[in-house]
């Protein structure tokens, strides 16, 4: 049996995920404040203590000297640029959907690749984006064109958010391995760097594309439907596995229970995010065709609704090898077949035409129209080729596992969205700063300055030398008379050697003169410098 690949939080963060401080089912962002951030991450992975959780991104501001990382905020974190001494890696683990979550083998010889993509999330019918609820945002992928590019909405792409836009920019993902446990077993973490320095390029206009198609697969462009398709496809594969001829063997039955449990926790996660009203209140089976009534059907010794809640309560048991948690523990093949039949799933046929897919999709309803950022109300006009980026737009990252030789539904395995973030401006007042120290000469007497070599060489052409010689001979009186001397007969250029300390002193003096003159307009001298100690008097 080939186990389904899945993206999870990086394996070193699983203890933090079990404690509830990190999401288990989505990538995490790590923050570094030194240029050797890759070496630092390697050192953390090789350390048996493995305190990678201390590197997880959290809001920070340096507007006040006492703030820094001690700042506690609820807003979307800002990612600062490398010039601010900040570097960010998105990390995740590609695992097999089986107990113990072993690493999924990647086969480059079969053209299998992993990479990350940057996504922009624009609010949809809500003041803020919630990355765990697809109905609160519109998702865009970045497609570079020439020196710039544009954001293309995922609703225009077959497969929706779980697809890749044609020509979408990939972010290189690289593996880091480390030894886990006393048995010497090696685990892998995949990481990709967030290109914060390209903020000015990414802050470009988005290109909305209206959805208009009679193809049934066009429904996947609606929020959450592509993820729903993946879950229904997973349930259909479990039905086919249950009907396999080898299902009489004990090992095959265990694999069926394992596959069904992973399908249950995926469906539970989806319903809790996208249909909280259905998730929080049990329905009653009155023989109808609504989703609450379908989930009230008898299954797993109780109902589907109760079984999903039981599976969700035991979702963290998957990190243990050989665990068979409820509600699948002890279920026979015939019982599991009956449980799946209660949902009305069909083993064959297109996923988007499956009755259960249609039932859940109808319960999700139609999305709210996306507001036009230019007008502040109403849907964006289809005639407008460009829509300006919203001030409430945020960014996130998805990991992609691509297998071009697999059947169409299995070629791409997309991770959930990472935590959202904003890209900080170069001159963001909240940004940290690198402290720069310029030491001027201590002894500025002639004897002291003579000690410094004239280490800067300036090559001057013959033409430029003529012009420089002509300027040196001009006097103020010549400017009034208009009698400017002509060029000298110079046929050779020259090389000038200059002293760096004297250049630095002259630059400082000229800077202070310019700042003092412009202070008449800007009044910025109190903000420009602070010199200690002050001169007496």
Image (cartoon, rainbow, N blue to C red):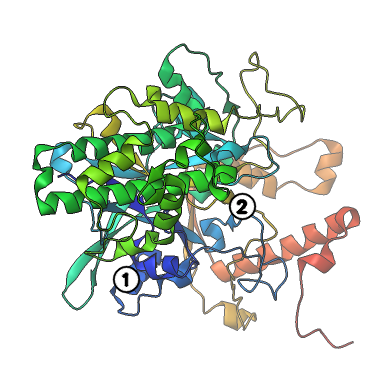
Q: Residue furthest front?
A: 286
Residue toward you, 141 or 150: 141
Residue at mark 2: 424
Q: Position of residue 191 (x, y in %)?
A: 36, 55
Residue 146 visible in the current orientation = no
Q: Residues within 10 Å of mark 1 (few under 14, many from 20)?
A: many
Residue toward you, 243 or 302: 302
Q: Position of residue 356 (x, y in %)?
A: 41, 30
Q: Residue furthest top?
A: 214
The residue depicted at 68 percent of the width and 35 percent of the height is 125
Residue 45 tag number: 1
Image quadrant holding the C terminus, namely: bottom right
The quarter of the picture where residue 533 lies is bottom right
- Count of numbered tags: 2
The residue depicted at 16 percent of the width and 73 percent of the height is 184
Residue 260 vs 160, above or below: the answer is below
Q: Position of residue 396 (x, y in %)?
A: 51, 46
Residue 158 vs 461, above or below: the answer is above
Q: Residues within 10 Å of mark 2 (few under 14, many from 20)?
A: some
- Where disc 2 sits, the SS reads loop
Residue 509 tag number: none
Residue 273 visible in the current orientation = yes
Q: Is residue 319 left or right of residue 292?
A: left
Q: Residue furthest bottom?
A: 536
**Circle 2 or circle 1, nearest the eye:** 1
Q: Is residue 373 left or right of residue 15?
A: right
Q: Is residue 435 left or right of residue 163?
A: right
Residue 167 vs 43, above or below: the answer is above
| Dot placed on the residue nearer the N-terminal end, 2 or 1 | 1
Residue toward you, 177 or 464: 177
Q: Position of residue 332 (x, y in %)?
A: 22, 50
């Amino acid at each position: 049996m080939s186990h389904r690949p899945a993206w999870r939080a990086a394996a070193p963060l699983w203890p933090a995920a079990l404690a509830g401080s990190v999401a288990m089912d989505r990538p995490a962002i790590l923050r570094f404040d030194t240029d050797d951030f890759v070496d630092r991450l390697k050192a953390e992975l090789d350390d048996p203590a493995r305190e990678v959780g201390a590197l997880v991104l959290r809001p920070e501001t340096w507007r006040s000297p006492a703030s820094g990382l001690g700042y506690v905020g609820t807003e979307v974190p800002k990612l600062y640029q490398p010039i601010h001494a900040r570097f960010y890696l998105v990390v995740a683990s590609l695992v097999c959907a089986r107990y113990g979550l072993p690493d999924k083998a990647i086969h480059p010889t079969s053209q299998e690749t992993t990479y990350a993509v940057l996504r922009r999330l624009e609010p949809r019918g809500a003041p803020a984006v919630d990355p765990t609820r697809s109905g609160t945002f519109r998702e865009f992928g970045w497609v570079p064109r020439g020196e710039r590019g544009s954001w293309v909405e995922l609703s225009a792409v077959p497969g929706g958010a779980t697809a890749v836009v044609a020509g979408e920019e990939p972010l290189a993902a690289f593996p880091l391995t480390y030894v886990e446990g006393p048995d010497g077993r090696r685990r892998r973490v995949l990481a990709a760097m967030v290109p914060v320095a390209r903020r000015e390029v990414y802050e470009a206009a988005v290109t909305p594309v209206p959805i208009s198609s009679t193809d049934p697969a066009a429904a996947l462009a609606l929020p959450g439907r592509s993820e729903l398709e993946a879950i229904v496809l997973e349930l259909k594969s479990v039905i086919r596995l249950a009907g396999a001829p080898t299902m009489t063997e004990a090992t095959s039955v265990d694999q069926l229970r394992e596959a069904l449990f992973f399908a249950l926790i995926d469906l539970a996660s989806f319903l809790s995010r996208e249909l909280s009203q259905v998730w929080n209140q049990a329905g009653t089976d009155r023989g109808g065709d609504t989703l609450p009534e379908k989930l009230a059907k008898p299954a797993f010794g109780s109902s589907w609704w109760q079984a999903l809640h039981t599976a969700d309560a035991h979702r963290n048991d998957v990190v243990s090898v050989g665990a068979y948690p409820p509600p699948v523990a002890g279920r026979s093949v015939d019982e599991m077949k009956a449980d799946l039949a209660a949902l009305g799933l069909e083993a064959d046929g297109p996923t988007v035409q499956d009755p259960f897919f249609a039932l859940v999709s109808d319960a999700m309803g139609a999305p709210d129209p996306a507001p036009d950022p230019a007008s502040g109300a109403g849907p964006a006009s289809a005639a407008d080729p460009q829509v300006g980026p919203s001030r409430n737009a945020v960014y996130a990252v998805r990991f992609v596992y691509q297998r071009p030789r697999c059947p169409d539904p299995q070629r791409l395995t997309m991770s959930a969205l990472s935590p959202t973030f904003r890209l900080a401006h170069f001159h963001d007042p909240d940004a940290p700063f690198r402290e720069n120290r310029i030491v001027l000469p201590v002894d500025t007497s002639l004897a002291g300055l003579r000690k410094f070599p004239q280490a800067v060489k300036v090559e001057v052409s013959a033409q430029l030398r003529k012009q420089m010689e002509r300027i040196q001979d001009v006097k103020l009186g010549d400017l009034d008379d208009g009698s400017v001397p002509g060029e000298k007969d110079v046929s050779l250029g020259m090389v000038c050697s200059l002293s760096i300390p004297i250049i630095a002193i002259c630059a400082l003096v000229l800077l202070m003169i310019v700042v003092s003159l412009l202070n008449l307009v800007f009044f910025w001298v109190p903000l420009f410098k602070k010199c200690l100690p002050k001169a007496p008097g």
